[in-house]
Image (cartoon, rainbow, N blue to C red):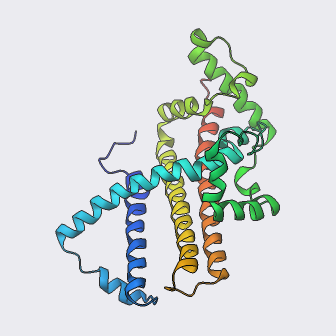
Amino acid sequence: MIKQNPFSLYDFLGYFVPGALMIYLYLIIEYIKTNNGTFKISGFLSSTSDLKLDQFLFFVIISYAIGHLINFISSITIEKYANWKYDYPSKYLLGFEKKSYWIKGIGNLWRVLLPILLFPTTIFDLILGDLFKFKNFYTRKLDQFLIEVIKEKGITLVNKLFKNKTGNQDIKKIRGYDFFRIFAHYTFEHSKNHQFKMVNYVSLYGFLRVLCLITTIGFWFVISTMIFTDYLNFNIWTLIIIGFINYTFFMAFMKFYRRYTLEGLMLIAINEEI
């Protein structure tokens, strides 16, 4: 069983590092402003390397606090967009039919605004993900045998745990439920040898989700710089490169989001007690 530490891997990857990256992004912008639009990595590092102990502790605390904010924003933007467009991994892995992103868009302002706010992600997802089928790398379903086994054992588990509360459940009923939350808690509690792997997947997909958001912020910073200032002489290729990096982080997030879910589903499949 995993021992609970005051500062976990998720705290480091999900909060501290993203917060520190946001602070350094701000420092880079200020450095460029004070150096007439030029950026030298050696000069930047020398200007930020002289930190005293009290300044370092303040940096750690502020990074951790900002990281919480960035992590939360990424969960209601990057992850929300992924779930709205592709559905939860537990559902597309099991081959459940997905409705179009825009079917519920009318009347849901956030669903309409997200593709605009996440423009580098959505445009590359449209071109590379949909047109060139990159989405098959991170949204493909399981083979039919595994789908049937997991569905059968999943229904058995739900009926075993909640029969007296909800009556017998079937696939048609459970499709609309957040059933993987039950699976994840059950497998985490009953599969001690796999806990570390599941925690790692959560930490990695949370970290990559935040990196996707940070590069989105960087993309919009470049856009605003090109329009309103003369700090840097950006061109269209700069935006394309940032957009591609952003979509790479999105694909990596989706990959580990899928792996975490797949781990939970497979632990249901191989559980001899179900």
In the picture, the quarter occupied by the C terminus is top right
**Image location of residue 1, percent across then percent down:** 40, 39
**Image location of residue 167, percent across then percent down:** 64, 11
Can residue 201 be seen in the rendering of this structure?
A: no
Name, please, the residue furthest toward the top. Answer: 164
Image-based side of 38 in relation to 144, left or right: left
Quarter assignment of residue 105: top right
**Image location of residue 174, percent across then percent down:** 68, 25
Image-based side of 77 in relation to 137, left or right: left
Residue under the image location 56 percent in, 88 percent down: 233
Residue under the image location 63 percent in, 17 percent down: 159
**Between residues 8 and 114, which one lies in front from this camera angle?**
114
Name, please, the residue furthest toward the front. Answer: 228
Tell me: residue 186, above or below residue 168. below
**Between residues 50 and 179, which one lies in front from this camera angle?**
50
Can residue 211 be seen in the rendering of this structure?
A: yes
**Image location of residue 80, percent across then percent down:** 60, 47
Image-based side of 29 in relation to 90, left or right: left
Numbered disc total: 0
Image-based side of 32 in relation to 76, left or right: left
**Between residues 181 and 87, which one lies in front from this camera angle?**
87
Residue under the image location 37 percent in, 66 percent down: 20
Residue under the image location 22 percent in, 64 percent down: 57
Tell me: residue 182, above or below residue 122. above
Quarter assignment of residue 155: top right
Tell me: residue 101, above or below residue 228. above
